[in-house]
Amino acid sequence: MELRHYKFQRITIDPEKCLGKPCIRGLRIPVSSILSYLSAGMTIEEILSEFPELEREDIYEALGFAAEAMEERFIPLEEAVKK
């Protein structure tokens, strides 16, 4: 059963694909992979060339989805040690 994110229509989640990780448009391309490629220095054009089934808007939605996910999380930092 494939579900679409209520805010990001290009993001789908299907327990039968990629272990239920959020993916792009039902493809077996996880959002996390797109983010990894970008963080490794690949350009959007390089990603689109490597994966011709992707569209530029897919990459932008992956970034938006990641930003939204980070807004929902609080990462506690250890208090700075006083000298």
Image (cartoon, rainbow, N blue to C red):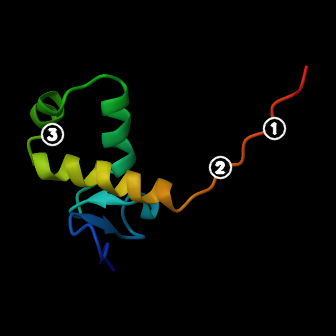
Quick one: SS at disc 1? loop
Instruction: State how many labels appear.
Output: 3
Identify the image quadrant of the C terminus: top right
The crowding category of the residue bearing disc 3, from other C-alpha atoms within 10 Å (few below 14, some 14 to 19, many at least 20), is: few
Q: Please state which amino acid type lies under the numbered disc 1.
A: Glu
Q: Which mark is residue 51?
A: 3
Which residue is depicted at the point 30% across and 54% down?
64
User: In the displayed structure, would residue 72 be above or below residue 34?
Assistant: below
Q: Please state which amino acid type lies under the numbered disc 3.
A: Phe
Quick one: SS at disc 2? loop
| Residue placed under numbered mark 2 in the picture | 75
Horizontal and vertical percent position of residue 7: 28, 71
Query: Position of 50 compared to 24: left or right?
Result: left
Gap between marks 1 and 2 measured at Cα: 12 Å
Residue 14 sits in which quadrant? bottom left
Identify the image quadrant of the N terminus: bottom left
Q: Please state which amino acid type lies under the numbered disc 2.
A: Ile
| Residue placed under numbered mark 1 in the picture | 79
Gap between marks 1 and 3 measured at Cα: 43 Å
